[in-house]
Amino acid sequence: MKAYNKYSVHLWLQKIIRNIYEVRHMAVHLIDLERYLSGIMFPASKNDLRQKARDNHAPDVIIDIINNLPERNFSSSGDLSKAVDEIE
């Protein structure tokens, strides 16, 4: 059995906490993204998404997510979710 010192256990716990935070953070962004894109019609371009988010008064963090998406048309909300998963 491998022995662990307090420092290595501390680092391991920090990593787990950071991963949990990132997963929760990502889930919040996806929920917010759906909220601020309410009314979008697919297929939609990146510009369409950005404009709809602005029309719905999205905060900068949502606009930043959209800005980081690839320049292409998104065929559905599922297609958009996959693209967001790839950048986060």
Image (spheres, rainbow, N blue to C red):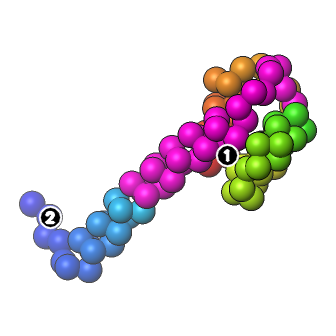
Q: Is residue 46 visible?
A: no
Whichever of callouts 2 and 1 sits on the residue coming sooner in the sequence is 2
Span shown in magenta: 19-45
| Quadrant of residue 75 within the rendered picture | top right
| x and y percentages locating residue 38 in the rendered image | 70, 31
- The residue type indicated by label 2 comes to Lys
Q: For numbered disc 2, what is the local secondary structure?
A: loop
Q: Residue at x 18, y 72 (%)?
A: 4
Q: Is residue 31 magenta?
A: yes
Q: Quadrant of residue 31?
A: top right
Direction from residue 35 to residue 2 in the image, left or right:
left
Residue 69: percent from left, percent from top: 78, 42
Disc on res. 14: none
Q: Position of residue 14 (x, y in %)?
A: 35, 69
By secondary structure, the bulk of the magenta-drawn segment is best described as: helix
Residue at the left extreme? Answer: 1
Residue indicated by mark 2: 2
Density class for disc 2 (Cα within 10 Å; few <14, some 14-19, many ≥20) is few
Residue 36 counted in the magenta span: yes
Which residue is denoted by mark 1 in the rendering?
Answer: 87
Residue at x-position 33% and y-position 72%: 11
> Callout 1: 10 Å neighbours few (<14), some, many (20+)?
few
| Quadrant of the image containing the N terminus | bottom left
Kindly identify the amino acid type of the residue bearing the numbered disc 1: Ile
In-image side of 88 versus 66 (left or right): left
Asked if one can make out residue 26 in the rendered structure from this viewpoint, the answer is: yes
User: From the viewer's perspective, is residue 30 above or below residue 60?
Assistant: above
Q: Position of residue 18 (x, y in %)?
A: 42, 62
Vertical placement of residue 76 versus 33, above or below: above
Q: Residue at x 82, y 47 (%)?
A: 54
Please state which of residues 83 and 39 is positioned toward the viewer in this rendering.
39
**In this view, which residue lies farthest toward the front?**
56
